[in-house]
Image (tube, rainbow, N blue to C red):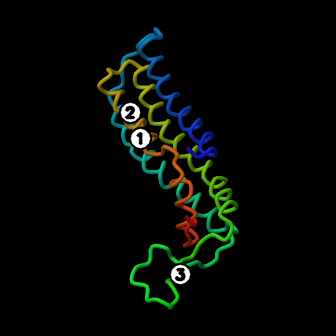
Amino acid sequence: MHPRLVTPRILWGALLASTVLFLAVLFFVPHEHAAPMPILPPALGVVAIGLGIFSFVLPMQQQRTVLQQAKVEITEAPDPNASGVIPYRDAPKRRVFADPKAAENKAFACYQTPLILGCALSEAIAIFGFMLGFLGHPPALFLPFFVASWVLIAVRFPTLARVRGPLEKAKGAVFPD
């Protein structure tokens, strides 16, 4: 594992764990139930769908804007994956980051905010489920909110490809192997 992935993974895990704690509170902490309002589950479901969409769109837009403005040096290098190269001819070129360490630093700096924003918006869906459960709705109505939140957070698990990929896409260059 890349050592710089530790912090994003801790943040990711903390946001995921908080949703589990919300569910534990519902099941293990006694609370009074009010008369459930039947309009709340579908209304919050619609808002949760919107939040799920925004949890991808907003962080992606923010990250794209920041990465397009990022200053990184790019050069050309022979493409080691090129096939059919004629001997004594130049191999096809590809755009690579001139200073891979600086480019990786820039990628990590631009990754953490979208990760937190996306996970926090996904966590809000679990909070809707928590609210429904706290107000007395049955588990069949509030558990889907938690499951949706867990799925949306799980797909954001930090990997090196998810950190580097947006910078590569924004700059049209790759990290040299």
Tell me the amino acid under the disc marked 2. Phe
Mark 3 nearby-residue class (10 Å; few <14, some 14–19, many ≥20): few
Quick one: label 3 or label 2, which is nearer the N terminus? Answer: 3
Numbered disc 3: secondary structure: strand
Picture quarter with the C terminus = bottom right
Q: Which residue occupies the extreme front position in the image?
A: 87
Residue 116 drawn above or below residue 22: below
Numbered disc 1: secondary structure: helix
Q: Position of residue 126 (x, y in %)?
A: 45, 32
Numbered disc 2: secondary structure: helix
Task: Name the residue that disc number 3 marks.
Answer: 93
Mark 2 nearby-residue class (10 Å; few <14, some 14–19, many ≥20): many
Quick one: label 1 or label 3, which is nearer the N terminus? Answer: 1
Q: Which residue occupies the extreme left position in the image?
A: 140
Picture quarter with the N terminus = top right
Task: Name the residue that disc number 2 marks.
Answer: 145
Q: Are marks 1 and 2 in contact (CB under 8 Å)?
A: yes
At x 48%, y 48%, the residue is: 55
- Mark 1 to mark 2 CA distance (whole Å): 8 Å
- Residue closest to the eye, 72 or 155: 72
- Mark 1 to mark 3 CA distance (whole Å): 46 Å
Q: Which mark is residue 152?
A: none
Task: Name the residue that disc number 1 marks.
Answer: 48
- Residue closest to the eye, 170 or 177: 177
- Residue closest to the eye, 148 or 131: 148
